[in-house]
Image (tube, rainbow, N blue to C red):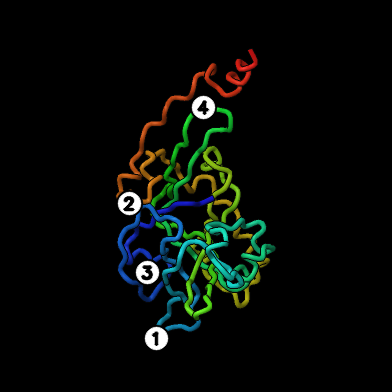
Amino acid sequence: MCGRFALTATPDELLELFGLLKVEDFPARFNVAPTQPILVIVASERREPGSNLPERSALLVRWGLTPGWVKDPRSFPLLLNARAETAVDKAAFRAAMRHRRILVPASGFYEWHRPLKGTRGSSQAYWVRPRRGGLVAFAGLMETWSSADGSEVDTAAILTTGANEAVRHIHDRMPVVVQPEDFTRWLDCRTQEPRDVADLLSPAPNDYFEAIPVSDKVNSVANTGPEIQDEVALPPAPAENESGADNAQMSLF
């Protein structure tokens, strides 16, 4: 899954990668959390006069998708992620897969390795970033939720797929990465049906990301500085006689 990520690129870097005409200034964000505003890239309805750039624009949405048919968001679960394998078949994501596909710019994401049930140890956080640096674009979905009083909220979820070799030892899921050459096809919901872009919903190449162990500072949304990405030494593995299996066996006596 993807429950935290970072976007520390400059507006100029976004303009260059996504072919945008303009983007508002924004601060570096090292610990983007659910329900917070996130920057997303959408297909524009028309090209700016005199521009040869792709028809794309950037906007802010709330991270946590709310389908339009939900009556009370307070009683509906927060949909941060959508499984790429089944999104087109799920009521919450079906319409967005067909009509509102987006890109979510990021500098990387955080993931936690959690000890197996019955074993000792605590969760270990990792900062997962492109091995060669730069920005990455996650595949996402967007929905606009309208309240009874007519107010609207744009919301989004990030698509996930099975983890590649760089991430699999941490978690079995990872965000779907869309490569620059596929931006237009992914965003084109007018001519590209979900089945036409299904080939894009696969794990990133095994050498695309590197996973850096970091401290538990990232666990708190109050920690928003670059220090949460500082590498830490991994704790020693528990001794064999401290494993959950051995403890369970000893508990019989």
**Residue 7 percent location from the top left of the image:** 38, 57
Task: Residue type at mark 1: give it.
Answer: Gly
Label 3 sits on a secondary structure element that is: helix
Q: Nearer the viewer, residue 125 or 13?
A: 125
Residue of label 3: 15
Tell which circle, 2 or 4, labels the residue nearer the N-terminal end. 4
Residue of label 2: 224
Q: CA distance from mark 2 to mark 4?
A: 29 Å
Q: Is residue 113 visible from the viewing direction of this image?
A: yes
- Say whether residue 11 is left or right of residue 234: left
Label 2 sits on a secondary structure element that is: loop
Task: Residue type at mark 2: give it.
Answer: Thr
Which residue lies at the image location 58% right of the left edge and 32% below the top edge?
117
Label 4 sits on a secondary structure element that is: loop
Instruction: Say above or below: 231 vs 242.
Output: below
**Residue 21 in which image quadrant:** bottom left
Residue of label 4: 120
**Residue 222 percent location from the top left of the image:** 34, 50
Residue of label 1: 50
Which residue lies at the image location 60% right of the left edge and 78% below the top edge?
190
